[in-house]
């Protein structure tokens, strides 16, 4: 059986443009950015923007956070009615204070009973598959994955995703393969394992050490959509594909930019002006582009100078000219 590769939900990163690029390059499953269940249940239009999809985008899973079972059920009903998502994923691992202070995200790992309740409430509100994404624990002294995994299964979810780090380590540091394997073996629902995969070899090690059949890529996929095919070729067929050439990198970067502009335009077409990003469409496309373009240049020479220069550029043509010159000298 071939490995299934998920793109991790990442706030501020996995918008529709990023998801389309990633899908074009072989990702099997993508998730939206994190969306507040309270925002959806209370019909906040700004919150709904995070569910916006480009027309070309196919199957995507809505990634939500919350700790109130009633809101979770209501949100599940709304998402189901929207009719454009293939599943609902609950955030049970975000360490950001804005999220944990209401008992959501990583705070849920302290309360497996509540985990079961919110999973069950979400399942009640939808006929879509429901999944739960969590971590091995809150910090090294508070490892709760076993109880949380059982609660997710008991609540009726069909998938558990485990990030193999504790919440106090955020997104850095070593991944605990032993605890990941234990989670894979503990429950009978599908378990997706996540954390620290930056190369085909990392992916092979993750699969080998944990016994999982599905993996999720986060930071390794930022500016590197080629990683999906490189991993599947390596682990399924033993073939090592080379990294992209500079020409290919430029081509995909331009493609990503095009999609980002299309997305900006779609937000303006579908929402009232007070909800638009600041600046004209070109300005906001350029500032959005600057946010993700450096991921593509990670590890390349002179990238700090390029970043400095970028502050001066306000138009798309200036930005593209500076990038082609930069690529040329690399
Ligand atoms: C910028 C950023 C934003 C993230 N946002 C979310 C989020 O909204 N929901 C979530 O479950 N995880 C979020 N994560 C965690 C990732 O989904 C993933 O679990 C983590 O980065 C570990 O995988 P990696 O080592 O492959 O990056 C985020 C990570 C990063 C770097």
Image (tube, rainbow, N blue to C red):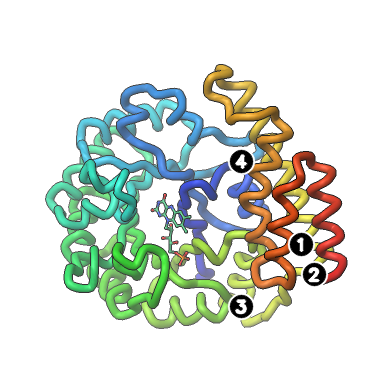
The mark closer to the camera, 1 or 4, is 1
Quick one: SS at disc 1?
helix
Mark 2 vs mark 3, CA separation in Å: 19 Å
Q: Which residue is mark 1?
A: 249
Q: Are marks 2 and 1 in contact (CB under 8 Å)?
A: yes
Circle 4 packing at 10 Å, graded few (<14), some (14-19), many (20+), is some
Residue at screen point 68% across, 65% down: 304
Judging depth in this view, the residue of 321 and 178 nearest the camera is 321
Q: Which residue is mark 2?
A: 245
**N-terminal label among 4 and 2:** 4
How far from the left and from the top, in percent, is residue 35? 40, 39
The mark closer to the camera, 4 or 2, is 2
- Left of 300 or right of it: where is 222? left
User: In the rendered image of this protein, does residue 293 appear above or below residue 287?
Assistant: below
Quick one: SS at disc 3?
helix
**N-terminal label among 2 and 3:** 3
Which quadrant contains ligand 1?
bottom left
Q: Which residue is mark 3?
A: 234
User: In the rendered image of this protein, does residue 268 appear above or below residue 98?
Assistant: above
Mark 4 vs mark 3, CA separation in Å: 26 Å
Circle 2 packing at 10 Å, graded few (<14), some (14-19), many (20+), is few
How far from the left and from the top, in percent, is residue 163? 36, 65
User: In the rendered image of this protein, does residue 85 appear above or below residue 144?
Assistant: above
Q: Which residue is mark 4?
A: 57
Q: Quadrant of residue 34?
A: top left
Q: Quadrant of residue 98?
A: top left
Residue at screen point 84% across, 63% down: 247
Residue at screen point 65% across, 29% down: 279
Mark 2 vs mark 1, CA separation in Å: 6 Å
């Amino acid at each position: 059986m071939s490995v299934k590769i998920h793109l991790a939900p990442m706030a501020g990163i996995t918008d529709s443009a990023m998801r389309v690029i990633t899908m074009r390059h072989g990702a099997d499953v993508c998730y939206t950015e994190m969306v507040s269940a309270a925002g959806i249940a209370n019909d906040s239009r700004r919150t709904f923007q995070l569910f916006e999809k480009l027309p070309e985008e196919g199957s995507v899973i809505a990634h939500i956070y919350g700790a109130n079972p009633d809101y979770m059920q209501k949100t599940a009903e709304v998402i189901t009615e929207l009719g454009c998502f293939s599943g609902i994923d609950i955030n049970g691992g975000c360490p950001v204070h804005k999220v944990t202070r209401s008992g959501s995200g990583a705070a849920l790992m302290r309360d497996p009973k509540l985990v079961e309740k919110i999973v069950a409430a979400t399942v009640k509100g939808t006929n879509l598959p429901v999944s739960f994404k969590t971590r091995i624990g809150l910090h090294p002294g508070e490892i709760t994955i076993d109880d949380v995994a059982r609660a997710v299964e008991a609540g009726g979810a069909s998938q558990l995703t485990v990030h193999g780090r504790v919440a106090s380590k955020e997104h850095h540091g070593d991944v605990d393969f032993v605890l990941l394997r234990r989670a894979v073996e503990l429950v009978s629902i599908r378990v997706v394992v996540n954390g620290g995969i930056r190369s085909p070899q990392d992916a092979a090690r993750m699969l080998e050490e944990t016994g999982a059949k599905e993996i999720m890529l986060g930071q390794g996929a930022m500016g590197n959509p080629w990683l999906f095919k490189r991993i599947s070729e390596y682990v399924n067929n033993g073939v090592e594909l080379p990294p992209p050439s500079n020409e290919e990198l430029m081509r995909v970067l331009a493609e990503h930019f095009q999609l980002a502009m299309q997305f900006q335009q779609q937000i303006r077409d579908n929402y009232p002006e007070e909800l638009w990003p600041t600046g004209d469409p070109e300005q906001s496309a350029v500032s959005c582009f600057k946010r993700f373009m450096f991921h593509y240049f990670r590890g390349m020479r002179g990238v700090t100078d390029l970043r400095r220069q970028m502050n001066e550029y306000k138009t798309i043509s200036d930005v593209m000219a500076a990038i082609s010159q930069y690529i040329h000298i690399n």
